[in-house]
Image (cartoon, rainbow, N blue to C red):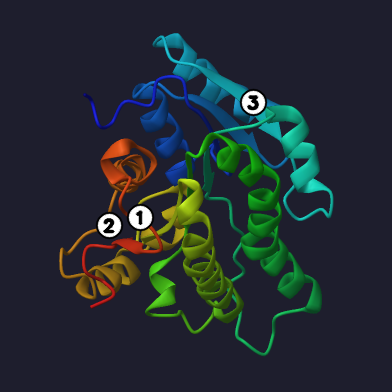
Amino acid sequence: MNLFDLTGKKALITGSTQGIGKAIAKCLASYGAKVFIHGSSSMEKCQGVCDDIIKIGNKAACVVADLSKNDCATIMYEQTGDIDILVLNASVQYRKAWNEITSEEFDTQVKVNFKSSLELISLYEPYMSKNNWGRIVTVGSVQQYKPHKDMLVYASTKEAQMSMVKNLAKQLAPKGITVNNMSPGVIATPRNDMALSDKEYAKKIYEGIPCGYAGKAEDCAGVVLLLCCEGGRYITGTDLIVDGGMHL
């Protein structure tokens, strides 16, 4: 028995046109899952990732929905139908001093990073419960442990999401559904390209990471694969931190 085989499973990965989400989608697809590539607005970006996955013989489809909108969960569900695996990776962050965040920026981060996660789980959970099998993985942040002074709201939404994970994990475990979180540290993705291109700033950041370097998106993908397959069936309600020791 291959504990990592996902053949026949359908997986939705939010925010999967680039970075960590894209790496997770490619990883799950390579182990047999049909993956739904999600983007907030660009069908072209989604299709590009889908084409890459299909080109090597795996299965993928596109989903476009803006998670900052009130009807985002329903729009997404209408495009995917029922799924077995839900990976909530999409997020929004604004780098601003705590007392300079606007009301709109606050609301957007709460909606995309937390509220939409709960809404999506509410729609996709019934099918998982019916089958007595499901995997839900949220993507958190090392900021749950070391919040950045200029991302107070972002860090707070990740803490809220982790609280939701622990709460739901206990309730859904009897239904065959595991609920976990994966917290990345400094990962070399498009979101961090500009900051890490400053050599002096990057040097300072790396000094705070015991491993001494930024991770790759693929470092996160393997951890999510474990949480989504039979090999991780006895893991629920936990946070797997992928940060090179930065939280220590």
* Amino acid at the residue labelled 1: Ile
- Give the side of residue 145 with respect to residue 214, left or right: right
- Number of labels in the image equals 3
Q: Can residue 166 be seen by looking at this rendering?
A: yes
- The vertical placement of 70 against 103, above or below, is above
Q: CA distance from mark 2 to mark 1?
A: 5 Å
Report helix, strand or loop for mark 2.
Answer: loop
Label 2 neighbour load within 10 Å: few <14, some 14-19, many 20+ = some
Q: Residue 154 location, x and y as percent?
A: 57, 72
* Amino acid at the residue labelled 2: Ala
- The vertical placement of 230 against 125, above or below, is above
**Which residue is disc 2 drawn over?**
214
**Which residue is disc 3 drawn over?**
62
* Residue contact at pointers 3 and 1, CB within 8 angstroms: no
- Give the side of residue 47 with respect to residue 26, left or right: right
| Residue at the (46%, 45%) spot, across then down | 176
* Amino acid at the residue labelled 3: Cys
* Residue contact at pointers 2 and 1, CB within 8 angstroms: yes
| Residue at the (33%, 48%) spot, across then down | 220
- The vertical placement of 133 against 81, above or below, is below
User: Which badge, 2 or 3, comes first in the chain's sequence?
Assistant: 3
**Which residue is disc 1 drawn over?**
187
Q: Residue lying farthest front?
A: 174
Label 3 neighbour load within 10 Å: few <14, some 14-19, many 20+ = many
The residue closer to the viewer here, 9 or 52, is 9
Q: Residue 34 location, x and y as percent?
A: 50, 22
* Residue contact at pointers 2 and 3, CB within 8 angstroms: no
Q: CA distance from mark 2 to mark 3?
A: 30 Å
| Quarter occupied by residue 143 | bottom left
